[in-house]
Image (cartoon, rainbow, N blue to C red):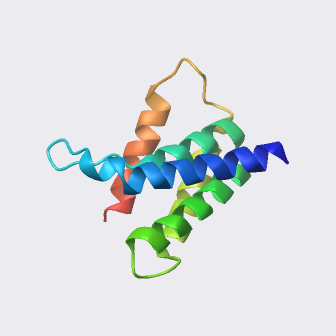
Amino acid sequence: MRRKIVMGILILVSILLQSTVCQMISIASIKPNLLIILTVSFGLMRGRKDGMVIGFFCGLLTDLFFESILGFNAIIYMWVGYFSGYFYRIFYDDDIKTPLFLISISLSLIHI
């Protein structure tokens, strides 16, 4: 139960930061996407199921706050969380290449 509450709080804090602070931060017109980072991180640390659940709720909130079509980003974020969960077994804490690779691939899929 506590894990679900913490997940919900993390998603809410990320969407609030994404919609307020991260809109002002821009380096060469590139803005950080905290929700993709959160989705990929949970997929890597917890596996496919948790990555998919976090991805769905992050995508649903992205649709509610930023997009006009409800559910499109929810499906994309859900797939990102699911596929990043495949790397759950081969991810090591000291390895930085796997998360960077997954986040960059996910961001390129979101912006197609």
55 relative position to 46: left or right: left
Please report the residue visible at 67 percent of the width from the left and 53 percent of the height from the top: 8
Please report the residue visible at 25 percent of the width from the left and 44 percent of the height from the top: 25
Quadrant of the image occupied by residue 92? top right
Q: Residue furthest bottom?
A: 69
Q: Position of residue 46 (x, y in %)?
A: 70, 40
Q: Position of residue 78 (x, y in %)?
A: 58, 62
Q: Residue furthest right?
A: 1
Q: Residue furthest left?
A: 28
Q: Position of residue 79 (x, y in %)?
A: 56, 61
Residue 106 in view in this figure = no
Please report the residue visible at 18 percent of the width from the left and 41 percent of the height from the top: 27
Q: Nearer the viewer, residue 88 or 35?
A: 35
Residue 85 in view in this figure = yes
As drawn, 14 above or below 79: above
As drawn, 23 above or below 28: below
